[in-house]
Amino acid sequence: MTEAEQIKAIAELDGPRMVGLVKCGMWWRPNSGGYTNCECEAGRYTMEEAKKREYVHGEPDDVTIREFSPKPYLTSRDAIVPVIQKYCGSLVVTGERWLFFFERLLSAVLLIDSAKHRASYPVEFVHAFFTATPAQLCEALLRTADKWTGN
């Protein structure tokens, strides 16, 4: 899979597409809290919510909808780990999904024979999770979600 395809597939797992609102070149802050130049401080709205607030009449103070930059899933653990948690859910409730994720991480991504390590799974899982790169975590998640294409 290309990086763009991976980012798109992970964004779909991450939840509904959120957009921002821009007025005079500045992002709206959440809860009508003013404006900011920083995208990371901008309010996030569903497309439906944003369309209700959009104001486009060809004026300098128009309020327009703008897409956010893609999250850095492939390079940041801070971006990918919450998606893994969201997808796999509570370990207590959906232990099988977590098991499947860790098996994909061990075998397909880190190339460790997971069958050899069944007895020491908890130790291997913790080690694999904390030593895997964000890109490896992304691949394991996409394989778990059956969204990985190619080898």
Image (spheres, rainbow, N blue to C red):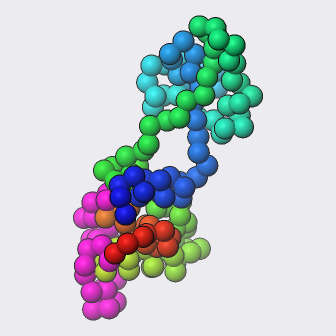
Residue depicted at 61% across the width and 49% down the height:
16
Residue 67, placed above or below residue 123: above
Q: Which residue lies furthest to the right in this view?
A: 52
With 44 as the anchor, is 103 left or right in this view? Answer: left
- Indicate the position of residue 14 as horizontal and vertical percent values: 53, 54
Q: Quadrant of residue 114?
A: bottom left
Residue depicted at 59% across the width and 45% down the height:
17
How many numbered marks appear? 0
Residue 82 in view (yes/no): no
With 73 as the anchor, is 113 left or right in this view? Answer: left
Residue depicted at 67% across the width and 31% down the height:
50
With 151 as the anchor, is 149 left or right in this view? Answer: right
- Indicate the position of residue 115 as horizontal and vertical percent values: 32, 91
Where's the N terminus, which quadrant? bottom left
* Camera-nearest residue between 118 and 100: 100
For the magenta stretch, what is the residue range? Answer: 108-135
- Magenta region, mostly helix, strand or loop? helix
Residue 105, placed above or below residue 74: below
* Camera-nearest residue between 138 and 86: 138
Residue 89 in view (yes/no): yes
Q: Quadrant of residue 37?
A: top left
